[in-house]
Image (spheres, rainbow, N blue to C red):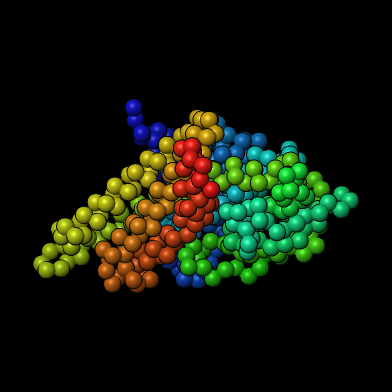
C-alpha cells in the first residue's frame, strides 16, 4: 500500500510550483501591502489550466486529464508562496465553477463556464450574511418570483471573488418560500455582475488574505430572469452543504501549502541564525518545535490527499464527508499552530512584515473559519460517529 501521489500528479506539482515561484512569489509581499488583486496573474493561472482541472472538455476543462486531486495539488503549491492566490483558485473553482457545473442547466453551463474555466472570468458564491453563517437556515435574503423574474432583496458578507474587475456572476442563496414543516425554503440563484440593484460594496480591510478579492454584497429590488434559478427550487441549502464538502478538502490543501512554507522558512533560518557561537537549529528548544511542524505537515498532507482520493474514486458520500471534515479540522488547526511556531523561531524578525512568516501568520487564522469553523467540523465528525450532537 502506498500513500504517494502518482508520477503525473508530481509532474503537475512541479509545473505549478515553477509558475508560482516565477509569477507570484516575487510580488506577493507587495500585493499584500497594497491590498492588490492581480487580475493579470489570475488570468495566467487560467491559461495554465488551473481553473479547468475538474471541468469537462466541452467547457474548456481538463476532462479525463484532470481530477480533484490535481486541483488540491495546485492550491497547495499556490498557497506555499501566497495564500491569497491559493484561496482565489480554491473559491474560483469550488464556490464559483462547481455549483454551476453540478447543478446548472445546459444553458447555464454554456453561458458561464467557458470564461470561468479559462480564467477570463470569476464567480462567487453568496451564502454568509450578517446574521447567518453556519446557520444557513437563518438566511434573511429573500427572492420573490414576480411574473418571469426573481426579485432579490438582502445582503451577503465575506464573499470571495465577488467584486473583481473580472467577476461575471455570483450565486446567492435566498428564501423563496416556506416548507411544509415551517422552515424556510432556501434556493440558489445566479446573479450576473452589473445587474441593477446588485452592488459589490467596498472591499474589506482584512487581517490577512490582503490580495484576495472579498466584498459584502447588497441586493435591492434586484431583478433576474426566472431561469437563473440554480438547481431545484428549495434545494439551495442541500446544494450548499455538498459544495462545502469539496471546499473543505481544498481548504485543507491550502493549509498544507501554508505548513510547507513555514517548514521551508524555519529550516533555512534555523541553520543560518547564529546565537552563542552556533546556529539556533542545534538548540533542542528550537529543533523540537521544527520537528513537530514536520509531523503536522506530513499528517495534514496525508489526510488531505486521502480525502481527495476518496472524492476522485467516487466513494460513498458519508465516507467522503467524514474524511473532508477530519482533514479540514486537522490541517487548518495545524496551519495556525505551524505559523505560530515559525514566528516564534524567527523571534523578533517574525514580527516584522519584511519577513514572509508574518504574512503567513496573519493569513492562517481564517483557515479555521472559512468553509465551516473548527467547531462545525467537530460537530460533523461526532455525528459521523453516530453521536446525536447538536
- What residue is rendered at 68% in x and 40% in y? 103
- What residue is rendered at 25% in x and 55% in y? 290
Total count of labels: 0
Decide if residue 148 is in sight here: yes
* Direction from residue 106 to residue 11 in the image, left or right: left
Where residue 287 sits: x, y (%)? Answer: 20, 56
Q: Quadrant of residue 219?
A: bottom right
Residue in front for this viewpoint, 112 or 1: 1
Where residue 147 sits: x, y (%)? Answer: 89, 51
* Direction from residue 185 to residue 1 in the image, left or right: left
Decide if residue 311 is in sight here: no
Please tell me whether residue 126 is drawn above or below residue 301 in the rendered image.
below
- What residue is rendered at 44% in x and 60% in y? 365
Where residue 376 sits: x, y (%)? Answer: 50, 50
Residue in front for this viewpoint, 188 or 376: 376
Where residue 215 sits: x, y (%)? Answer: 61, 64
Please tell me whether residue 8 is drawn above or below residue 262 in the rendered image.
above
Residue in front for this viewpoint, 287 or 272: 287
Task: Give the residue at the far top of this rendering.
Answer: 1
Q: Quadrant of the N terminus?
A: top left
Task: Give the residue at the far right of this rendering.
Answer: 147
- What residue is rendered at 60% in x and 45% in y? 241
Task: Give the residue at the far left of this rendering.
Answer: 277
Amino acid at each position: 500500500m502506498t500513500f504517494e501521489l502518482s508520477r503525473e500528479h508530481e509532474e503537475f506539482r512541479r509545473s505549478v510550483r515553477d509558475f508560482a515561484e516565477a509569477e507570484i512569489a516575487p510580488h506577493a509581499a507587495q500585493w499584500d501591502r497594497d491590498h492588490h488583486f492581480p487580475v493579470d496573474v489570475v488570468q495566467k493561472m487560467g491559461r495554465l489550466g488551473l481553473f479547468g482541472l475538474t471541468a469537462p472538455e466541452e467547457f474548456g476543462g481538463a476532462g479525463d486529464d484532470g481530477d480533484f486531486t490535481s486541483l488540491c495539488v495546485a492550491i497547495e503549491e499556490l498557497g506555499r508562496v501566497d495564500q491569497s492566490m491559493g484561496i482565489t483558485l480554491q473559491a474560483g473553482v469550488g464556490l464559483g465553477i462547481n455549483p454551476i457545473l453540478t447543478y446548472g442547466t445546459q444553458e447555464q453551463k454554456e453561458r458561464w463556464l467557458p470564461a470561468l474555466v479559462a480564467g477570463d472570468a470569476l464567480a462567487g458564491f453568496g451564502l454568509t450574511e450578517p446574521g447567518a453563517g453556519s446557520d444557513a437556515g437563518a438566511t434573511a435574503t429573500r427572492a420573490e418570483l414576480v411574473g418571469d423574474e426573481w426579485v432579490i432583496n438582502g445582503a451577503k458578507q465575506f464573499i470571495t471573488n465577488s467584486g473583481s474587475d473580472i467577476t461575471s456572476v455570483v450565486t446567492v442563496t435566498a428564501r423563496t418560500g416556506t416548507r411544509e414543516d415551517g422552515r424556510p425554503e432556501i434556493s440558489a440563484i445566479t446573479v450576473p455582475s452589473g445587474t441593477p440593484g446588485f452592488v459589490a460594496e467596498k472591499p474589506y480591510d482584512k487581517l490577512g488574505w490582503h490580495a484576495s478579492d472579498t466584498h459584502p454584497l447588497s441586493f435591492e429590488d434586484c431583478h433576474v430572469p426566472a431561469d437563473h434559478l440554480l438547481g431545484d427550487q428549495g434545494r439551495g441549502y442541500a446544494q450548499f452543504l455538498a459544495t462545502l464538502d469539496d471546499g473543505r478538502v481544498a481548504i485543507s490543501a491550502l493549509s498544507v501549502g501554508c505548513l510547507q512554507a513555514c517548514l521551508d522558512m524555519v529550516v533555512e533560518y534555523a541553520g543560518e541564525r547564529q546565537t552563542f557561537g552556533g546556529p539556533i537549529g542545534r538548540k533542542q528548544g528550537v529543533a523540537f518545535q521544527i520537528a513537530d511542524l514536520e509531523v503536522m505537515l506530513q499528517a495534514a498532507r496525508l489526510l488531505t490527499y486521502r480525502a481527495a482520493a476518496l472524492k476522485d474514486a467516487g466513494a460513498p458520500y458519508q465516507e467522503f464527508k467524514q474524511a473532508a471534515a477530519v482533514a479540514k479540522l486537522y490541517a487548518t488547526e495545524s496551519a495556525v499552530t505551524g505559523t505560530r511556531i515559525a514566528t516564534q523561531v524567527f523571534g523578533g524578525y517574525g514580527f516584522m512584515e519584511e519577513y514572509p512568516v508574518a504574512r503567513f501568520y496573519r493569513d492562517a487564522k481564517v483557515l479555521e473559519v472559512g468553509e465551516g469553523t473548527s467547531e462545525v467540523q467537530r460537530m460533523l465528525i461526532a455525528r459521523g460517529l453516530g453521536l446525536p450532537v447538536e
